Structure formats: C-alpha cells, structure tokens
Image (cartoon, rainbow, N blue to C red):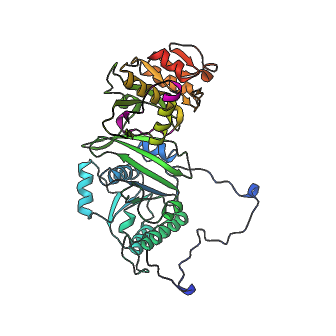
Amino acid sequence: MAEERQESAAASRATRLTGSRSVPLPISEVPPQAEVRLPCGIGELDRVLGGGLVPGSLVLIGGDPGIGKSTLLLQAMHHLAEAADVLYVSGEESAAQTRLRGERLGLSGRRLLVLAENGLEEIVAQIEHLKPRAVVVDSIQTVWTRSLESAPGSVSQVRESAGRLMVLAKGSGVPIFIVGHVTKDGAIAGPRVLEHMVDTVLYFEGDRGHPYRILRAVKNRFGSTNEIGVFEMKSGGLEEVANPSELFLSERPLNAPGSVVTASLEGSRPLLVEIQALVTPSSYGTPRRTTIGVDSNRLALLVAVLEKKAGLHLGGQDIFLNVAGGARLAEPAADLAIMLAVASSHLDRPVPHQTIVFGEVGLAGEVRAITQPELRIAEAAKLGFTDCVLPAGNLRRLQSGAMQFTAVHTVQEALASLL
C-alpha cells in the first residue's frame, strides 16, 4: 500500500508537451520529422539504442548494483561532451566521488558538468539554464520534489519525478538518461508505469564476478528490441566486445560430452554460444531440472520429446543445462542443440567440436525450419566451423560452399547422424 496525496484542480501540474494547442489531423497530413540521432561514441550502446540517441528521448537503464550502469553512462557522456556541454546529475554520490570515478576511467574535460543534487526543481532549473546536449540522472529513486510530502524513492515521488523529466525532455529536445534500481527478482523498482512513460528501457545484465556484461533493450520506440550490446569490464572501464561469438567460445572444451554450439540471432547480429548439459542419476525421488540462460519449462518439454520419440530414459536423471558466457537464449532455434547436448551427456558421446547445430523442434519430434540461416552459417564459417546440422526445410534455400550440411527431418535423424 502506498499513500497518495490528492490535489485540487487549481494545483494541477499538468503541462503540455508542445507549446501550441493540438488539433486532430489526418495521418497522411501529419508533417514528417527527420530522424536525427546523436552517436554516443560507444558502438555497442548505439546499436542497442537503434543507431544513436534520439533528441528529446527519455531512456531508462536498470541493472543490479555494481554491474556498471554509472560507468557506462559516464563514458557515454564523456564522448558526447566533445561537441557540447552535457550534464551528469549524481543523486547517490558527491561531486568528488564522481570525479574520482572519472579519473579512474581516464575521463576529463570542461564540458562534462557534474551536479550533485536530489531536488527535482533544482535539476530542472539547471537543465533549462544550461541547455545541455544530454543529461544523466543517477538515479531516479533519489530524486524528490517539494510538491509531494512522501519520502524520496516512494512510488509517488518516482512517478512524479519521471513525469516531469519526460515533459522536460519532449519540450526542450534534450535526451535524458535515468538510472533505475532493481528489485530482488531483477525488475526495475518503482511503479510499473515508469517503464510505460519512457521511450526506451535498457537492462544491463551480467555477474559481478564475471567480466562480461550484456546490454539488452526490452522496449524501444526508436529501434529494435532484439539488439544486444556486449561489453567487458576492465580496470579502465567498460570496453566493447567486437566479436561476441569468439568471446563465448574462447574456453570451450573440445570433444567433451554434453557440449554443443548453436547460432542464436539477436536482432541483426548472429551469436555463436555453447550449450552445456550434465545428466547424472538422481539421488532423490524427484529428478531436478536446473537451467541457466534457458527457460526451464522449455527444457522440460524437450526432455519429454527425447523420452517419447528418441527412446532415451531420462525420468530418473538430474539434468543441468547452462549457456556458457552468461548469454540468454529465448528463440526456439536452439531447441535441437539443447536436445543434442542432453543426449550427448546422457550417452557419454561427444558431438564433433567443429559442428554447429540449430533448428526448432516440435512436439512430434519434427525439426522445423528457422529464420535467416545464412547469417548463422556465415558467422560459424568465420570461426572455423566446417559442419552444420540444420533443418531440411532450410537446406533448399542455401548455396553450397565450404560448409558441409547435414539436413534432418526429425530428432531421431539428428541423434543418428551425430551420436
């Protein structure tokens, strides 16, 4: 329960996004607006944003504490400050602490302005006075307005502060980044309406004990939500990973049972990832199904197909499945690779290390065609893979080349060809 303060109509703070009164127009007569984007100087961030930062946009970025949100935004502001003033509003750290972070990252410059402030009215006044090229508010949970009596971080304060910043961004054309805290289950804290108010929602994923980070868009009004950006955390800050596929496969064991490589498509970028499975006899009455990077319900469905259609007895086996490198697979093109990894570990027979596998699997055990196999195969060929197991429905549209293709119609054919 959250206490909400009701205000009279006279005290309403409603503000138009534009200065003139709006009138309805036929959609064909709405004047077009040229798309202008500001490059942030970080290619992976620009990719996730859809090509750059759109003027007047409001971008929400969330992630676990210490994952690198402030580091990424400070580096982006440093690049944007090369052409004009930018404003970094720090509500959690003092200006001296922000300077120490900048020195550790090797950042400097007179156009990167730091403001240690929590009051919304003061922040808005500084933005209107400076008219910066871009603004970062770190974080929205620390900002409060005097027009509400609730404490900073409460539902009403977060919603009101985000609403005022949205109106300011749309009216002035200044793009604003706001950082949001996350709850225990990984969702951005505060009212759910916060994600509906902003133009773009980015999640920064990764393990603080692991050097690699993945930036993912879950909402983007100016681009695709399927793009991801991959970074590596180093002592000098976040560095872009130009070839994520090579990163995810750098420590892959060769000819090890339970290890299969598949090609996942994240937006326009194909990624090669290693799927690892471990199948062991269960010492409990109910066998466990544990997954990292894959939906556990999907694994249960594929295991049932293996038992019914391939004749593997997995009912008394614990199955552990992991996507190496911290990647997350959501598309069904990884189904066949998951099943082959489980079968390989169960039978203790390795899949040839130079083989890549992809394909969607149905409940009848059939292997269905997937989208854009050409991009996946081209990425695999660049990394030295020579064999490919793929659905027969995709083979008709592929040209023969250096890659050797094995087209399969059912799961049984895939198991027979590789195991």
Position of residue 405 measured from the top left corner of the image (x, y, whole percent) = 53, 15
User: Is 77 positioned to the left or the right of 381 in the image?
Assistant: left
**Number of marks present in the image shown:** 0
Quadrant in the picture for residue 372: top right
Query: Is residue 320 depicted above or below 258 in this figure?
Result: below
Quadrant in the picture for residue 327: top left
Residue 43 seen:
no
Q: Check the image and name the residue furthest to the front.
A: 285
Q: Nearer the viewer, residue 99 or 203?
A: 203
User: Is 184 positioned to the left or the right of 301 in the image?
Assistant: left
Position of residue 382 measured from the top left corner of the image (x, y, whole percent) = 44, 21
Query: Is residue 104 depicted above or below 322 in this figure?
Result: below
Residue at point 42%, 56% (across, down): 187
Q: Is residue 321 magenta?
A: yes
Position of residue 182 measured from the top left corner of the image (x, y, whole percent) = 38, 58
Q: Nearer the viewer, residue 267 or 52?
A: 267
Q: Is residue 315 magenta?
A: yes
Image quadrant where one finds the C terminus: top left
Residue at point 60%, 27% (across, down): 369
Position of residue 263 measured from the top left corner of the image (x, y, whole percent) = 48, 29
Query: Is residue 335 depicted above or below 37 in this figure?
Result: above
Segment tinted magenta in the rendering: 306-330
Image quadrant where one finds the N terminus: bottom left
Residue 345 seen:
yes
Query: Is residue 365 depicted above or below 255 in this figure?
Result: below
User: Is 402 positioned to the left or the right of 21 in the image?
Assistant: left
Q: Nearer the viewer, residue 36 or 265?
A: 265
Q: Nearer the viewer, residue 288 or 74?
A: 288
